[in-house]
Amino acid sequence: MWVDVIVEDVLRMRPTTQHVINDAKSPSGPIHVGSLRGVILHDCVARGLQAKNHSVTFLFGFDDYDPLDSRPAAVPVEFDRYLGMPLSDVPSPDGGGGSYARHYGLGFERVWKTLGAHPDVYWTSEMYKSGQFNDAITLALDRADELIQIDREISGSQKAERHPVQLICESCGRIGTTVVTGWDGRQVSYECRPDKVAWAQGCGHHGRRSPLNGGSKLQYVVEWAAKWKILGVTIEGAGKDHMTKGGSHDRASAMVERVFRYQTPYPIPYEWFLVGGRKMSTSKGVGLPAAELVDILRPELARFLMVRPHYRQQINFDPGGETIPTLYDEYDRAAAAYAGDLEAKTPAEADLLRDHARTFYYSHAEGESPRCFRMRFAKVAYLMQMPTVDIEREAERDKGAPLTDADRVELRQRMNDARRWLQTYAPDQYRFQVQSRLPDISLDDAQRAFLGRLAEAVRGRPVWTGEELHEQIHALKNQLGLPPKQAFSAIYLTFLGKPSGPQAGWFLAALDRDFVVSRLQEAAGAMRAGPR
Protein backbone atom coordinates (compact mmCIF):
# COMPACT_ATOMS: atom_id res chain seq x y z
CA MET A 1 0.00 0.00 0.00
CA TRP A 2 1.43 3.37 -1.03
CA VAL A 3 1.46 4.91 2.47
CA ASP A 4 3.50 2.01 3.83
CA VAL A 5 5.90 2.26 0.87
CA ILE A 6 6.47 5.96 1.60
CA VAL A 7 6.99 5.27 5.30
CA GLU A 8 9.59 2.57 4.59
CA ASP A 9 11.38 4.86 2.13
CA VAL A 10 11.41 7.72 4.64
CA LEU A 11 12.90 5.43 7.29
CA ARG A 12 15.60 4.35 4.85
CA MET A 13 16.38 7.81 3.43
CA ARG A 14 15.97 9.86 6.63
CA PRO A 15 17.25 7.72 9.55
CA THR A 16 15.95 9.82 12.43
CA THR A 17 13.44 9.01 15.14
CA GLN A 18 11.88 12.49 15.07
CA HIS A 19 10.03 13.87 12.07
CA VAL A 20 8.28 17.13 11.31
CA ILE A 21 5.66 16.83 8.57
CA ASN A 22 4.43 20.07 7.04
CA ASP A 23 1.60 21.12 4.75
CA ALA A 24 0.40 24.65 3.97
CA LYS A 25 -2.17 26.65 2.09
CA SER A 26 -2.82 30.30 1.26
CA PRO A 27 -6.36 31.03 2.56
CA SER A 28 -7.21 33.31 -0.36
CA GLY A 29 -10.83 32.18 -0.71
CA PRO A 30 -13.12 29.17 -0.12
CA ILE A 31 -10.58 26.33 0.12
CA HIS A 32 -11.48 23.63 -2.38
CA VAL A 33 -11.62 19.90 -1.86
CA GLY A 34 -8.36 19.34 -3.75
CA SER A 35 -6.42 20.80 -0.82
CA LEU A 36 -7.79 18.03 1.39
CA ARG A 37 -5.75 15.49 -0.54
CA GLY A 38 -2.56 16.98 0.84
CA VAL A 39 -3.88 17.05 4.41
CA ILE A 40 -5.01 13.42 4.33
CA LEU A 41 -1.81 12.26 2.59
CA HIS A 42 0.37 13.88 5.25
CA ASP A 43 -1.91 12.62 8.02
CA CYS A 44 -1.57 9.03 6.74
CA VAL A 45 2.23 9.29 6.58
CA ALA A 46 2.24 10.66 10.14
CA ARG A 47 0.10 7.72 11.29
CA GLY A 48 2.38 5.26 9.53
CA LEU A 49 5.51 6.68 11.17
CA GLN A 50 3.85 6.81 14.59
CA ALA A 51 2.90 3.13 14.19
CA LYS A 52 6.65 2.46 13.77
CA ASN A 53 7.26 4.20 17.13
CA HIS A 54 8.69 7.37 15.62
CA SER A 55 8.02 10.79 17.09
CA VAL A 56 6.06 12.90 14.61
CA THR A 57 4.95 16.52 14.66
CA PHE A 58 2.35 17.23 11.97
CA LEU A 59 2.03 20.92 11.06
CA PHE A 60 -0.35 22.81 8.83
CA GLY A 61 0.39 26.42 7.97
CA PHE A 62 -1.95 29.09 6.69
CA ASP A 63 0.13 31.48 4.60
CA ASP A 64 -1.94 34.49 5.57
CA TYR A 65 0.79 37.08 4.94
CA ASP A 66 0.34 36.49 1.21
CA PRO A 67 -1.40 39.34 -0.64
CA LEU A 68 -5.04 39.15 -1.73
CA ASP A 69 -4.42 38.87 -5.48
CA SER A 70 -7.95 38.21 -6.76
CA ARG A 71 -11.50 38.35 -5.52
CA PRO A 72 -13.49 35.08 -5.56
CA ALA A 73 -16.98 35.36 -7.03
CA ALA A 74 -18.55 34.70 -3.61
CA VAL A 75 -16.81 37.74 -2.07
CA PRO A 76 -18.50 41.18 -2.36
CA VAL A 77 -17.12 43.52 -5.02
CA GLU A 78 -16.25 46.16 -2.42
CA PHE A 79 -13.39 43.88 -1.33
CA ASP A 80 -11.50 45.00 -4.43
CA ARG A 81 -10.20 47.86 -2.27
CA TYR A 82 -8.13 45.32 -0.30
CA LEU A 83 -6.35 43.79 -3.32
CA GLY A 84 -2.61 43.74 -2.68
CA MET A 85 -2.94 43.74 1.13
CA PRO A 86 -1.90 40.75 3.31
CA LEU A 87 -4.76 38.29 3.81
CA SER A 88 -4.32 38.66 7.56
CA ASP A 89 -5.16 42.40 7.26
CA VAL A 90 -8.27 41.99 5.12
CA PRO A 91 -11.55 41.90 7.08
CA SER A 92 -13.70 38.78 7.17
CA PRO A 93 -16.24 38.63 4.31
CA ASP A 94 -18.96 37.58 6.77
CA GLY A 95 -18.66 40.85 8.68
CA GLY A 96 -17.31 39.15 11.79
CA GLY A 97 -14.41 40.33 13.87
CA GLY A 98 -11.76 38.03 12.41
CA SER A 99 -9.70 38.37 9.27
CA TYR A 100 -10.40 37.19 5.74
CA ALA A 101 -7.70 34.53 6.20
CA ARG A 102 -9.12 33.27 9.50
CA HIS A 103 -12.62 33.05 8.01
CA TYR A 104 -11.53 30.65 5.28
CA GLY A 105 -8.70 28.97 7.17
CA LEU A 106 -10.75 28.02 10.23
CA GLY A 107 -13.51 26.70 7.97
CA PHE A 108 -11.00 24.39 6.30
CA GLU A 109 -9.67 23.31 9.70
CA ARG A 110 -13.17 22.21 10.73
CA VAL A 111 -13.36 19.99 7.65
CA TRP A 112 -10.10 18.15 8.21
CA LYS A 113 -10.97 17.61 11.89
CA THR A 114 -14.19 15.95 10.74
CA LEU A 115 -12.03 13.62 8.64
CA GLY A 116 -9.87 12.70 11.63
CA ALA A 117 -6.76 14.78 10.85
CA HIS A 118 -5.33 16.92 13.67
CA PRO A 119 -2.23 18.87 12.61
CA ASP A 120 -0.89 21.70 14.74
CA VAL A 121 -1.87 24.96 13.02
CA TYR A 122 0.40 27.97 12.53
CA TRP A 123 -0.18 31.30 10.77
CA THR A 124 2.74 32.82 8.87
CA SER A 125 1.63 36.37 9.73
CA GLU A 126 2.27 35.52 13.38
CA MET A 127 5.64 33.99 12.52
CA TYR A 128 6.69 37.17 10.72
CA LYS A 129 5.44 39.52 13.42
CA SER A 130 7.05 37.50 16.23
CA GLY A 131 10.44 37.63 14.52
CA GLN A 132 10.73 33.96 13.53
CA PHE A 133 11.57 34.99 9.96
CA ASN A 134 14.00 37.78 10.92
CA ASP A 135 17.21 35.81 10.29
CA ALA A 136 15.87 34.44 7.00
CA ILE A 137 14.86 37.94 5.83
CA THR A 138 18.26 39.40 6.70
CA LEU A 139 20.01 36.54 4.90
CA ALA A 140 17.74 36.94 1.85
CA LEU A 141 18.49 40.67 1.66
CA ASP A 142 22.23 40.11 2.07
CA ARG A 143 22.25 37.42 -0.62
CA ALA A 144 19.46 38.69 -2.85
CA ASP A 145 21.54 38.51 -6.03
CA GLU A 146 22.39 34.87 -5.34
CA LEU A 147 18.76 33.94 -4.72
CA ILE A 148 17.70 35.71 -7.92
CA GLN A 149 20.39 33.84 -9.83
CA ILE A 150 19.29 30.49 -8.38
CA ASP A 151 15.72 31.24 -9.43
CA ARG A 152 16.85 31.99 -13.00
CA GLU A 153 19.23 29.04 -13.15
CA ILE A 154 16.72 26.42 -11.98
CA SER A 155 13.66 27.81 -13.75
CA GLY A 156 15.54 28.50 -16.99
CA SER A 157 13.82 31.88 -17.16
CA GLN A 158 15.63 35.19 -17.59
CA LYS A 159 12.54 37.27 -16.82
CA ALA A 160 12.74 40.64 -15.10
CA GLU A 161 14.44 40.66 -11.71
CA ARG A 162 12.18 39.64 -8.83
CA HIS A 163 13.59 40.62 -5.46
CA PRO A 164 13.25 37.88 -2.79
CA VAL A 165 11.75 40.26 -0.20
CA GLN A 166 8.49 42.27 -0.30
CA LEU A 167 7.88 45.25 2.02
CA ILE A 168 4.63 46.27 3.65
CA CYS A 169 3.84 49.81 2.42
CA GLU A 170 3.56 52.08 5.46
CA SER A 171 1.16 54.34 3.57
CA CYS A 172 -1.46 51.98 2.05
CA GLY A 173 -0.69 48.69 3.83
CA ARG A 174 -0.18 46.77 0.57
CA ILE A 175 2.47 44.13 0.11
CA GLY A 176 1.82 43.00 -3.44
CA THR A 177 2.72 46.36 -5.00
CA THR A 178 6.07 47.20 -3.39
CA VAL A 179 9.58 46.95 -4.84
CA VAL A 180 12.85 46.93 -2.87
CA THR A 181 15.24 49.65 -4.08
CA GLY A 182 17.97 49.46 -1.44
CA TRP A 183 19.24 47.72 1.73
CA ASP A 184 21.80 49.18 4.14
CA GLY A 185 21.90 46.27 6.57
CA ARG A 186 19.30 47.86 8.86
CA GLN A 187 16.56 49.40 6.73
CA VAL A 188 15.12 48.81 3.29
CA SER A 189 14.29 51.50 0.75
CA TYR A 190 11.15 50.68 -1.23
CA GLU A 191 8.57 52.03 -3.65
CA CYS A 192 4.83 51.21 -3.75
CA ARG A 193 4.29 51.23 -7.50
CA PRO A 194 0.86 51.83 -9.07
CA ASP A 195 1.70 49.64 -12.08
CA LYS A 196 3.74 46.79 -10.55
CA VAL A 197 0.94 44.21 -10.94
CA ALA A 198 -2.26 44.11 -12.98
CA TRP A 199 -4.47 43.01 -10.07
CA ALA A 200 -3.72 45.80 -7.57
CA GLN A 201 -2.69 49.46 -7.66
CA GLY A 202 0.05 50.78 -5.43
CA CYS A 203 -0.21 54.21 -3.85
CA GLY A 204 3.09 55.64 -5.18
CA HIS A 205 4.67 55.99 -1.71
CA HIS A 206 8.50 55.96 -1.38
CA GLY A 207 9.90 55.08 2.02
CA ARG A 208 12.45 53.38 4.26
CA ARG A 209 11.69 50.93 7.03
CA SER A 210 12.96 47.92 8.92
CA PRO A 211 12.01 44.69 7.16
CA LEU A 212 11.92 42.74 10.44
CA ASN A 213 9.12 41.80 12.85
CA GLY A 214 6.40 41.89 10.22
CA GLY A 215 7.71 44.78 8.12
CA SER A 216 8.19 42.50 5.14
CA LYS A 217 7.71 38.97 3.87
CA LEU A 218 9.72 36.66 1.66
CA GLN A 219 8.62 35.87 -1.88
CA TYR A 220 6.76 32.56 -2.07
CA VAL A 221 9.60 30.23 -3.14
CA VAL A 222 12.13 31.81 -0.78
CA GLU A 223 9.58 31.67 2.04
CA TRP A 224 8.99 27.96 1.36
CA ALA A 225 12.72 27.27 1.65
CA ALA A 226 13.04 29.38 4.81
CA LYS A 227 10.09 27.68 6.51
CA TRP A 228 11.69 24.27 6.05
CA LYS A 229 14.66 25.39 8.13
CA ILE A 230 12.75 27.49 10.67
CA LEU A 231 10.27 24.68 11.41
CA GLY A 232 12.75 21.81 11.06
CA VAL A 233 10.62 20.13 8.39
CA THR A 234 11.73 16.63 7.35
CA ILE A 235 8.77 15.59 5.14
CA GLU A 236 6.57 17.70 2.88
CA GLY A 237 4.58 16.79 -0.20
CA ALA A 238 3.07 19.11 -2.81
CA GLY A 239 0.85 18.99 -5.85
CA LYS A 240 2.40 18.07 -9.18
CA ASP A 241 2.25 21.66 -10.45
CA HIS A 242 4.89 22.57 -7.83
CA MET A 243 6.98 19.47 -8.57
CA THR A 244 7.62 19.92 -12.30
CA LYS A 245 11.23 20.18 -13.47
CA GLY A 246 12.43 23.72 -12.79
CA GLY A 247 9.27 24.45 -10.82
CA SER A 248 8.82 26.03 -7.42
CA HIS A 249 9.94 22.94 -5.46
CA ASP A 250 13.16 22.59 -7.43
CA ARG A 251 13.93 26.28 -6.87
CA ALA A 252 13.09 26.13 -3.15
CA SER A 253 15.25 23.02 -2.80
CA ALA A 254 18.25 24.73 -4.36
CA MET A 255 17.74 27.83 -2.21
CA VAL A 256 17.40 25.95 1.08
CA GLU A 257 20.52 23.89 0.49
CA ARG A 258 22.78 26.54 -1.06
CA VAL A 259 21.71 29.62 0.90
CA PHE A 260 19.94 28.48 4.09
CA ARG A 261 22.16 25.40 4.52
CA TYR A 262 19.39 22.93 5.31
CA GLN A 263 18.49 19.58 3.75
CA THR A 264 15.42 19.54 1.50
CA PRO A 265 12.59 17.65 3.23
CA TYR A 266 11.55 14.26 1.86
CA PRO A 267 9.31 15.18 -1.10
CA ILE A 268 5.98 13.54 -1.99
CA PRO A 269 4.69 14.75 -5.38
CA TYR A 270 0.98 14.01 -5.62
CA GLU A 271 -1.54 14.33 -8.43
CA TRP A 272 -4.45 16.73 -8.69
CA PHE A 273 -7.92 16.19 -7.33
CA LEU A 274 -10.46 17.11 -10.01
CA VAL A 275 -14.21 17.51 -9.70
CA GLY A 276 -16.07 16.62 -12.86
CA GLY A 277 -12.77 16.80 -14.76
CA ARG A 278 -12.05 20.41 -13.74
CA LYS A 279 -8.99 21.73 -11.89
CA MET A 280 -9.84 24.00 -8.98
CA SER A 281 -8.59 27.36 -7.73
CA THR A 282 -8.99 28.77 -4.21
CA SER A 283 -8.25 32.38 -5.11
CA LYS A 284 -10.77 32.33 -7.97
CA GLY A 285 -13.35 30.40 -5.96
CA VAL A 286 -13.50 27.68 -8.63
CA GLY A 287 -14.36 24.10 -7.67
CA LEU A 288 -16.07 22.16 -4.91
CA PRO A 289 -15.46 23.75 -1.46
CA ALA A 290 -13.91 21.26 0.95
CA ALA A 291 -16.80 21.72 3.38
CA GLU A 292 -19.25 20.40 0.79
CA LEU A 293 -17.44 17.07 0.49
CA VAL A 294 -18.39 16.15 4.05
CA ASP A 295 -21.99 17.00 3.19
CA ILE A 296 -21.80 14.46 0.34
CA LEU A 297 -19.72 11.68 1.94
CA ARG A 298 -19.37 10.38 5.48
CA PRO A 299 -15.85 10.98 6.92
CA GLU A 300 -14.58 7.42 6.37
CA LEU A 301 -15.76 7.42 2.77
CA ALA A 302 -14.22 10.85 2.09
CA ARG A 303 -10.89 9.60 3.47
CA PHE A 304 -11.23 6.41 1.42
CA LEU A 305 -11.73 8.53 -1.69
CA MET A 306 -8.36 10.18 -0.97
CA VAL A 307 -6.45 7.12 0.25
CA ARG A 308 -7.60 4.42 -2.19
CA PRO A 309 -5.79 5.73 -5.34
CA HIS A 310 -2.01 5.85 -5.50
CA TYR A 311 -0.82 9.37 -4.68
CA ARG A 312 0.58 9.72 -8.20
CA GLN A 313 -2.84 8.89 -9.66
CA GLN A 314 -5.29 11.68 -10.46
CA ILE A 315 -8.63 11.67 -8.63
CA ASN A 316 -11.64 12.78 -10.64
CA PHE A 317 -14.65 12.94 -8.34
CA ASP A 318 -18.16 13.36 -9.71
CA PRO A 319 -20.88 12.73 -7.11
CA GLY A 320 -23.39 11.90 -9.83
CA GLY A 321 -23.71 8.64 -11.76
CA GLU A 322 -22.35 5.44 -10.23
CA THR A 323 -19.55 7.15 -8.30
CA ILE A 324 -20.93 6.93 -4.75
CA PRO A 325 -22.44 3.41 -4.98
CA THR A 326 -19.18 2.16 -6.51
CA LEU A 327 -17.12 3.94 -3.84
CA TYR A 328 -19.24 2.29 -1.14
CA ASP A 329 -18.76 -1.16 -2.74
CA GLU A 330 -14.99 -0.69 -2.79
CA TYR A 331 -15.01 0.60 0.78
CA ASP A 332 -16.98 -2.49 1.88
CA ARG A 333 -14.50 -4.80 0.19
CA ALA A 334 -11.64 -3.04 1.96
CA ALA A 335 -13.51 -3.40 5.28
CA ALA A 336 -14.00 -7.13 4.66
CA ALA A 337 -10.30 -7.52 3.86
CA TYR A 338 -9.38 -5.65 7.06
CA ALA A 339 -11.67 -7.93 9.09
CA GLY A 340 -10.16 -11.05 7.50
CA ASP A 341 -13.47 -12.09 5.92
CA LEU A 342 -12.05 -12.59 2.40
CA GLU A 343 -9.98 -15.59 1.37
CA ALA A 344 -7.18 -15.29 -1.17
CA LYS A 345 -6.74 -18.13 -3.67
CA THR A 346 -3.39 -16.96 -5.06
CA PRO A 347 -0.36 -15.02 -3.75
CA ALA A 348 -1.38 -12.10 -5.98
CA GLU A 349 -4.86 -12.05 -4.42
CA ALA A 350 -3.28 -12.17 -0.95
CA ASP A 351 -1.18 -9.09 -1.79
CA LEU A 352 -4.26 -7.30 -3.10
CA LEU A 353 -6.25 -8.08 0.05
CA ARG A 354 -3.39 -6.79 2.21
CA ASP A 355 -3.49 -3.54 0.24
CA HIS A 356 -7.27 -3.34 0.70
CA ALA A 357 -6.90 -3.93 4.44
CA ARG A 358 -4.25 -1.22 4.81
CA THR A 359 -6.35 1.19 2.76
CA PHE A 360 -9.25 0.63 5.14
CA TYR A 361 -6.95 1.19 8.13
CA TYR A 362 -5.80 4.58 6.84
CA SER A 363 -9.33 5.51 5.74
CA HIS A 364 -10.94 5.20 9.15
CA ALA A 365 -11.28 8.63 10.68
CA GLU A 366 -11.00 7.97 14.41
CA GLY A 367 -9.98 4.96 16.51
CA GLU A 368 -10.63 1.32 15.68
CA SER A 369 -13.47 0.53 13.29
CA PRO A 370 -16.08 -1.77 14.87
CA ARG A 371 -16.71 -5.01 13.02
CA CYS A 372 -20.24 -4.96 11.63
CA PHE A 373 -22.55 -6.10 8.85
CA ARG A 374 -22.62 -3.75 5.90
CA MET A 375 -25.65 -3.92 3.61
CA ARG A 376 -24.80 -2.90 0.06
CA PHE A 377 -25.37 0.84 -0.38
CA ALA A 378 -27.25 0.49 -3.70
CA LYS A 379 -29.67 -1.94 -2.07
CA VAL A 380 -30.23 0.41 0.87
CA ALA A 381 -31.01 3.18 -1.63
CA TYR A 382 -33.54 0.95 -3.39
CA LEU A 383 -35.19 -0.19 -0.15
CA MET A 384 -35.45 3.40 1.09
CA GLN A 385 -37.89 4.05 -1.75
CA MET A 386 -40.23 1.21 -0.73
CA PRO A 387 -42.32 2.59 2.15
CA THR A 388 -43.76 -0.80 3.10
CA VAL A 389 -40.35 -2.41 3.53
CA ASP A 390 -38.74 -2.92 6.95
CA ILE A 391 -35.10 -2.26 6.10
CA GLU A 392 -33.76 -3.70 9.35
CA ARG A 393 -35.63 -6.94 8.67
CA GLU A 394 -34.22 -7.05 5.14
CA ALA A 395 -30.72 -6.47 6.55
CA GLU A 396 -31.19 -9.37 8.96
CA ARG A 397 -32.27 -11.57 6.05
CA ASP A 398 -29.13 -10.58 4.15
CA LYS A 399 -26.92 -11.17 7.15
CA GLY A 400 -28.65 -14.40 8.14
CA ALA A 401 -28.62 -13.39 11.82
CA PRO A 402 -30.02 -10.69 14.12
CA LEU A 403 -28.39 -7.27 13.83
CA THR A 404 -25.99 -6.12 16.54
CA ASP A 405 -25.90 -2.55 17.86
CA ALA A 406 -22.90 -1.86 15.60
CA ASP A 407 -24.84 -3.26 12.63
CA ARG A 408 -27.74 -0.90 13.33
CA VAL A 409 -25.46 2.14 13.65
CA GLU A 410 -23.88 1.32 10.29
CA LEU A 411 -27.26 0.68 8.64
CA ARG A 412 -28.67 4.02 9.88
CA GLN A 413 -25.58 5.82 8.56
CA ARG A 414 -26.12 4.23 5.16
CA MET A 415 -29.79 5.11 5.21
CA ASN A 416 -28.93 8.75 5.90
CA ASP A 417 -26.31 8.73 3.15
CA ALA A 418 -28.73 7.08 0.70
CA ARG A 419 -31.52 9.56 1.50
CA ARG A 420 -29.20 12.51 0.86
CA TRP A 421 -27.80 10.94 -2.31
CA LEU A 422 -31.24 10.17 -3.73
CA GLN A 423 -32.33 13.76 -3.12
CA THR A 424 -29.31 15.33 -4.79
CA TYR A 425 -27.03 13.22 -6.96
CA ALA A 426 -28.59 9.84 -7.82
CA PRO A 427 -29.15 9.24 -11.56
CA ASP A 428 -32.65 8.45 -12.80
CA GLN A 429 -32.13 4.70 -12.91
CA TYR A 430 -31.72 4.69 -9.11
CA ARG A 431 -34.84 6.72 -8.46
CA PHE A 432 -38.22 5.04 -8.62
CA GLN A 433 -41.61 4.81 -6.99
CA VAL A 434 -43.74 1.68 -6.79
CA GLN A 435 -47.04 2.57 -8.45
CA SER A 436 -50.18 2.06 -6.38
CA ARG A 437 -52.06 0.94 -9.52
CA LEU A 438 -51.01 -0.85 -12.67
CA PRO A 439 -49.56 1.88 -14.91
CA ASP A 440 -50.83 2.50 -18.43
CA ILE A 441 -48.36 0.29 -20.29
CA SER A 442 -47.98 -1.62 -23.54
CA LEU A 443 -46.82 -5.25 -23.35
CA ASP A 444 -46.63 -7.84 -26.12
CA ASP A 445 -47.93 -11.39 -25.85
CA ALA A 446 -44.53 -12.85 -24.94
CA GLN A 447 -44.04 -10.34 -22.11
CA ARG A 448 -47.53 -11.00 -20.70
CA ALA A 449 -46.93 -14.76 -20.84
CA PHE A 450 -43.64 -14.26 -19.00
CA LEU A 451 -45.33 -12.21 -16.26
CA GLY A 452 -48.05 -14.83 -15.86
CA ARG A 453 -45.49 -17.60 -15.40
CA LEU A 454 -43.56 -15.41 -12.95
CA ALA A 455 -46.76 -14.85 -10.91
CA GLU A 456 -47.25 -18.61 -10.66
CA ALA A 457 -43.67 -19.13 -9.52
CA VAL A 458 -43.84 -16.44 -6.85
CA ARG A 459 -47.19 -17.76 -5.56
CA GLY A 460 -45.73 -21.25 -5.33
CA ARG A 461 -43.40 -20.46 -2.43
CA PRO A 462 -44.11 -18.53 0.78
CA VAL A 463 -40.67 -16.88 1.00
CA TRP A 464 -38.12 -15.91 -1.64
CA THR A 465 -34.65 -14.47 -1.23
CA GLY A 466 -33.52 -11.89 -3.74
CA GLU A 467 -30.94 -14.25 -5.21
CA GLU A 468 -33.45 -17.08 -5.59
CA LEU A 469 -35.99 -14.88 -7.32
CA HIS A 470 -33.26 -13.43 -9.52
CA GLU A 471 -32.34 -16.95 -10.69
CA GLN A 472 -36.02 -17.80 -11.23
CA ILE A 473 -36.51 -14.74 -13.47
CA HIS A 474 -33.52 -15.73 -15.60
CA ALA A 475 -34.73 -19.36 -15.83
CA LEU A 476 -38.22 -18.30 -16.98
CA LYS A 477 -36.99 -15.89 -19.63
CA ASN A 478 -34.65 -18.58 -20.99
CA GLN A 479 -37.47 -21.16 -21.09
CA LEU A 480 -39.67 -18.75 -23.03
CA GLY A 481 -36.85 -17.51 -25.27
CA LEU A 482 -37.52 -13.93 -24.19
CA PRO A 483 -34.62 -11.46 -24.60
CA PRO A 484 -33.40 -10.04 -21.23
CA LYS A 485 -34.32 -6.47 -22.13
CA GLN A 486 -37.95 -7.43 -22.86
CA ALA A 487 -38.26 -9.57 -19.72
CA PHE A 488 -36.87 -7.04 -17.27
CA SER A 489 -38.57 -4.03 -18.85
CA ALA A 490 -41.91 -5.90 -18.50
CA ILE A 491 -41.29 -6.20 -14.73
CA TYR A 492 -40.21 -2.58 -14.30
CA LEU A 493 -43.10 -1.21 -16.41
CA THR A 494 -45.56 -3.26 -14.36
CA PHE A 495 -44.41 -2.00 -10.98
CA LEU A 496 -42.68 1.32 -11.69
CA GLY A 497 -44.16 2.58 -14.94
CA LYS A 498 -40.71 2.92 -16.56
CA PRO A 499 -38.51 0.40 -18.42
CA SER A 500 -35.60 0.26 -15.95
CA GLY A 501 -35.09 -0.05 -12.21
CA PRO A 502 -33.25 -1.86 -9.40
CA GLN A 503 -32.13 -5.50 -9.55
CA ALA A 504 -35.40 -7.24 -10.26
CA GLY A 505 -35.04 -10.31 -8.02
CA TRP A 506 -34.09 -8.35 -4.91
CA PHE A 507 -36.66 -5.69 -5.74
CA LEU A 508 -39.58 -8.13 -5.97
CA ALA A 509 -38.40 -10.15 -2.96
CA ALA A 510 -38.53 -6.99 -0.84
CA LEU A 511 -42.19 -6.33 -1.72
CA ASP A 512 -45.22 -8.02 -0.17
CA ARG A 513 -45.64 -11.42 -1.88
CA ASP A 514 -49.40 -11.16 -2.33
CA PHE A 515 -49.03 -7.68 -3.83
CA VAL A 516 -46.41 -8.98 -6.29
CA VAL A 517 -48.57 -11.92 -7.37
CA SER A 518 -51.65 -9.74 -7.80
CA ARG A 519 -49.83 -7.08 -9.85
CA LEU A 520 -48.13 -9.67 -12.08
CA GLN A 521 -51.44 -11.42 -12.76
CA GLU A 522 -53.14 -8.13 -13.54
CA ALA A 523 -50.39 -7.16 -16.00
CA ALA A 524 -50.42 -10.62 -17.61
CA GLY A 525 -54.13 -10.31 -18.28
CA ALA A 526 -54.06 -6.69 -19.41
CA MET A 527 -54.82 -5.62 -22.99
CA ARG A 528 -51.76 -5.49 -25.21
CA ALA A 529 -51.82 -1.74 -25.63
CA GLY A 530 -52.77 1.38 -23.84
CA PRO A 531 -55.07 2.19 -20.93
CA ARG A 532 -57.17 -0.38 -19.17
Image (cartoon, rainbow, N blue to C red):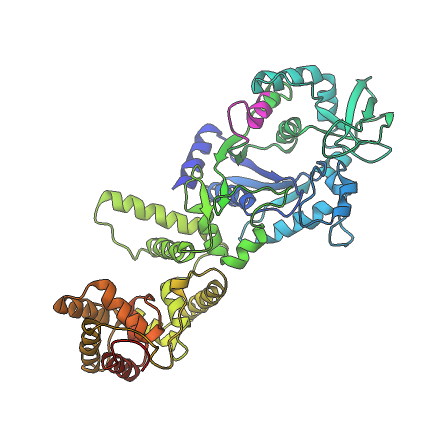
Task: Indicate the position of residue 237 as horizontal and vertical percent values.
Answer: 53, 35
Relative to 118, is 421 on the left or the right? left
Task: Indicate the position of residue 459 as horizontal and vertical percent values.
Answer: 21, 82
The quarter of the displayed image where residue 369 is located: bottom left
User: Where is the C terminus found, in terms of image quarters?
Assistant: bottom left
Q: Nearer the viewer, residue 515 or 379?
A: 515
First to last magenta residue range? 242-254
Magenta run includes residue 278: no
Q: Is residue 244 above or below residue 470?
A: above
Q: Nearer the viewer, residue 132 or 268?
A: 268
User: Where is the N terminus found, in terms of image quarters?
Assistant: top left
The quarter of the displayed image where residue 499 is located: bottom left
Task: Indicate the position of residue 75 as horizontal and vertical percent values.
Answer: 70, 49
Magenta run includes residue 245: yes
Q: Is residue 160 above or below residue 408?
A: above
Q: Nearer the viewer, residue 242 or 262?
A: 242
Is any atom of residue 441 visible in this view? yes
